[in-house]
Amino acid sequence: MKLKLITLALLTLWIPVSIDKWINFEIFQNGLIRQPFSDQLGQVLSYLLPVVETATIILLVVEKWRKAGMLLSTALMAVFTCYIGLALLGAWDKLPCGCGSVISQLTWKQHFFFNLAFLLLSAYGLLNLHRSGAAGGKTA
């Protein structure tokens, strides 16, 4: 039951975030291009992130692939959280938010803690799956 709640919580993050990127692709892409890395990387990430986030959703939904979904969710949240952490530490002079939906209304500090919470939730779900020894969490 605990694992199902974790999965549901993660889906409430990934589904709207992914849909927003697909529906507002040009806005998302322009936001990434304004980030403090090369335009080429921004272009690649603008296509890669929606696909990876959608894959995360599918992996989380399909029980036998849930461990891979938790792993991917943890990895994505770790990268996003580190990126925001670096921004908060002043790694860049100006950092526009390329996020959509409700997340775009958060301050950088709020965004960091939001991401940190979902990072910990993903890692906790992954740990529970690993401890149960189940590929998809059937015993958890």
Image (cartoon, grey):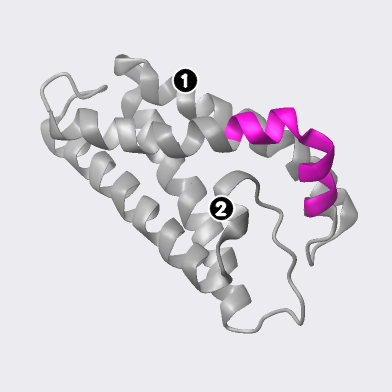
Q: Which residue is mark 1?
A: 58
Closest to the camera, between mark 2 and mark 1, is 2
Q: Quadrant of the N terminus?
A: top left
Task: Give me the residue at 47% from left, 20% from top.
Answer: 58
Q: Quadrant of the C terminus?
A: top left
Q: Which residue is mark 2?
A: 103
- Judged from this view, the residue extending furthest toward the right is 39
Nearest the viewer among 136 and 94 is 94
Circles 2 and 1, Cβ within 8 Å, touching? The answer is no
Magenta stretch, overall SS:
helix
The picture places residue 32, in percent across and down from the top left corner, at: 78, 52
| Vertical order, 35 against 136 (above or below) | below
Q: SS for tag 2? A: helix
What kind of residue is marked 1?
A: Ile
Range of magenta residues? 18-31
Q: Where, by quadrant of the figure, is residue 16 drawn?
A: top right
What kind of residue is marked 2?
A: Ile
N-terminal of the two: label 2 or label 1? Answer: 1
